Image (spheres, helix red, strand yellow):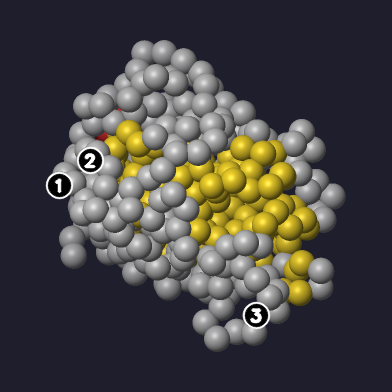
């Protein structure tokens, strides 16, 4: 394995910042993150960008529409994109990248090594932000700037101020008196409500107290609500730009599911949006396009479930998130590696 010198990383990230861009920009008040780990199946047969096409593996169906909008709605996010840049491939299993705009850095987990790392794109320097991390997987960004973390071995969702010493306090650790399995991926609504997935990947022989693998919501009073329990292993989670849709992937049984989200944060019944192969993490851009990490790479779909194409990554990706000053850099965690690519449409952190 190789790791680029800091100067080479910084130059590569500078090149990403000046990569493909659309002149019409928009902003969003939503903050969130991404995470999730576990087995991933092969990718579907969809158009490919940046490498050889994947083998047939199920493809993507169509479903209900949700979350598209803005001036980027008809912009192809993959048109003319460059190569995926390797930032480093010296980790054990990377996950949960999240952009921290107040600091201009991106943080990501190395689950087996029990760390959360921080990359400064300007200098290319990678440091350790939290160690031990309770084997944190997914990370998210709260509206007040706090980092929200899915702790595998801690079996809880925690939060800490993004600046200063790590001071992790519990957001939620039980549901109806039962300890969570191993919280995996998290997204935070602009009003501060927290949505997360809870598969069993991080239990490692521990006692499973909740008799299902679920998706949960923590409201502003700290009460935990069940969103859904119909999953093999719920994993990736994201909100649409207008926060009216909640998306969840199943990394065991496959499929991307969507829930309507009410004004108070409550969710309706789930609907199958994309009959996709098992997917780990995911991200959403300002146009509502969906980025799913699968065995094929990062599969990109319109909000209605029709495919744009695939971003091919040197290693099988686990998760992805948008970052950079213009929010057009897609940071990708993939097994031992951490990667980046510039896209045409900005996205949510």
First along the sequence among labels 3 and 2: 2
Q: Residue at x 24, y 31 (%)?
A: 81
Note whether residue 248 is visible: yes
Q: CA distance from mark 3 to mark 2?
A: 40 Å
Mark 1–mark 3 contact, CB under 8 Å?
A: no
Q: Is residue 300 left or right of residue 130?
A: left
Question: Which residue position is annotated with label 1?
Answer: 52
Question: Which residue position is annotated with label 2?
Answer: 48
Depth check: give the residue in front, 262 or 25: 262
Mark 3–mark 2 contact, CB under 8 Å?
A: no
Question: Which residue position is annotated with label 3?
Answer: 208
Expressed as whole percent of the image width and height from the top left, the position of residue 127 reads: 40, 56
From the image, state whether disc 3 or disc 2 is nearer to you. Answer: 2
Which label sits on residue 338? Answer: none
Q: Residue at x 79, y 38 (%)?
A: 264
90 up-or-down from 205: above or below: above
Q: Is residue 73 left or right of residue 52?
A: right
First along the sequence among labels 1 and 3: 1
Callout 2: SS = loop
Expressed as whole percent of the image width and height from the top left, the position of residue 266 reads: 76, 44
Q: Is residue 185 left or right of residue 312?
A: right
Mark 1–mark 2 contact, CB under 8 Å?
A: yes
Note whether residue 106 is visible: no
> Tag 1: Cα neighbours inside 10 Å, few (<14), some, or many (≥20)?
few
Expressed as whole percent of the image width and height from the top left, the position of residue 250 reads: 50, 58
> Tag 3: Cα neighbours inside 10 Å, few (<14), some, or many (≥20)?
some
Expressed as whole percent of the image width and height from the top left, the position of residue 28 reads: 57, 26
Q: Is residue 79 left or right of residue 260?
A: left
22 up-or-down from 77: above or below: above
Callout 1: SS = loop
Q: CA distance from mark 1 to mark 3?
A: 41 Å
């Amino acid at each position: 394995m190789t790791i680029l010198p800091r100067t080479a990383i910084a130059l590569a990230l500078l090149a990403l910042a000046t990569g493909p861009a659309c002149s019409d920009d928009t902003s969003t008040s939503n903050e969130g993150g991404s995470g999730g780990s576990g087995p991933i199946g092969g990718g579907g047969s969809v158009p490919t960008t940046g490498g050889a096409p994947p083998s047939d593996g199920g493809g993507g169906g169509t479903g209900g529409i949700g979350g598209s909008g803005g001036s980027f709605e008809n912009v192809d996010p993959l048109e003319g994109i460059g190569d995926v840049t390797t930032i480093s491939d010296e980790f054990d299993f990377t996950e949960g990248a999240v952009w921290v705009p107040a600091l201009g850095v991106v943080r990501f987990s190395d689950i087996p090594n029990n760390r959360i790392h921080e990359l400064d794109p300007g200098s290319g320097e990678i440091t350790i932000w939290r160690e031990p991390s309770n084997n944190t997987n997914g990370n998210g960004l709260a509206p007040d700037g706090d980092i929200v973390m899915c702790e595998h071995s801690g079996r809880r969702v925690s939060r800490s101020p993004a600046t200063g010493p790590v001071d992790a306090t519990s957001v939620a650790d039980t549901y109806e008196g039962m300890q969570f399995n191993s919280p995996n991926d998290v997204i935070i609504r602009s009003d501060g409500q927290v949505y997360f997935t809870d598969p069993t990947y991080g239990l490692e022989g521990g006692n499973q107290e909740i008799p299902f693998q679920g998706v949960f919501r923590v409201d502003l009073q700290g009460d935990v609500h069940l969103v859904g329990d119909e999953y093999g292993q719920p994993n990736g989670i994201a909100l649409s730009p207008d926060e009216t849709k909640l998306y969840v992937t199943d990394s065991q049984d496959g499929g991307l599911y969507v829930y309507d989200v009410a004004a108070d944060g409550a969710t309706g019944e789930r609907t199958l949006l994309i009959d996709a192969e098992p997917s780990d993490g995911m991200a959403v851009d300002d146009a509502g396009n969906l980025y799913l990490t699968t065995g094929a790479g990062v599969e990109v779909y319109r909000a209605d479930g029709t495919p744009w194409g695939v971003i091919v990554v040197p290693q099988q990706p686990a998760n992805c998130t948008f970052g950079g000053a213009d929010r057009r850099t897609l940071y990708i965690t993939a097994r031992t590696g951490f990667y980046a690519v510039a896209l045409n449409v900005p996205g949510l952190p």
